[in-house]
Image (spheres, rainbow, N blue to C red):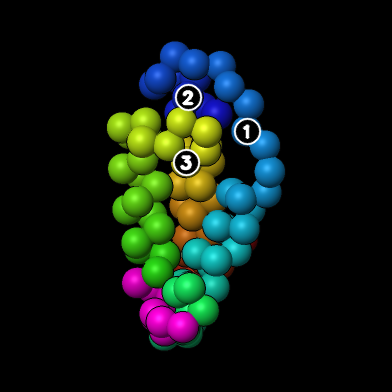
Amino acid sequence: MGWNNLVKNRDINAYGASGAIYSVISLMACIAPKATFQLYGIIPIPAWLCVTGIFAYDTYSAMYDKQKGTDTAGHVGGLLAGMGYFLARRFRLF
């Protein structure tokens, strides 16, 4: 919501739990980067590659407003929160 308010000058709400889901996915990819995700249920992809692709796609969509009905900035925030939590625990910040 901060991205939309400060950069895009729009006041919109964010609904759902997708940011929280993305933070758990990115945390899992940091803990076990060689774990496998199934794309469309049949194509195995390493977790690190899947999260990198999601991050790149959502960052591009947030910056250039490619998905009007989706809060892609919330997705990026969730991914960064998961990675930040992993780094904080890794370097014993708390």
Q: Which residue is mark 2?
A: 4
Mark 1 and mark 3: Cα distance apart in space: 10 Å
> Quadrant location of the C terminus?
bottom right
Q: Identify the residue at image location x=58%, y=22%.
A: 12
Q: Which residue is mark 1?
A: 14
Which residues are drawn in magenta? 42-49
- In depth, the one of 93 and 56 nearer the eye is 56
Q: Which residue is mark 3?
A: 72
Task: Please provide percent x and percent y for residue 48.
Answer: 38, 73
Task: Please provide percent x and percent y for residue 3.
Answer: 45, 28
> Quadrant location of the N terminus?
top right
Residue 15, compared with residue 78, is above or below; it is: above
Residue 34, compared with residue 19, is above or below; it is: below
Q: Secondary structure at mark 2?
A: helix
Mark closer to the observer (2, 3): 3
Mark 1 and mark 2: Cα distance apart in space: 10 Å
Task: Please provide percent x and percent y for residue 38.
Answer: 48, 79
Mark 2 and mark 3: Cα distance apart in space: 10 Å
- Relative placement, left or right, of 77 versus 43 is right
Count of labels in the image: 3
Q: Amino acid at mark 2?
A: Asn
- The mark that comes first in sequence, 2 or 3, is 2
Structural crowding at the residue carrying mark 1, measured as other residues with C-alpha within 10 Å and reported as few (<14), some (14–19) or many (≥20):
some
Q: Amino acid at mark 1?
A: Ala
Q: Secondary structure at mark 3?
A: helix
- The mark that comes first in sequence, 1 or 3, is 1
- The mark that comes first in sequence, 1 or 2, is 2
* Residue 85 visible (yes or no): no
Residue 87, compared with residue 15, is above or below; it is: below
Q: Amino acid at mark 3?
A: Thr
Q: Is residue 20 magenta?
A: no
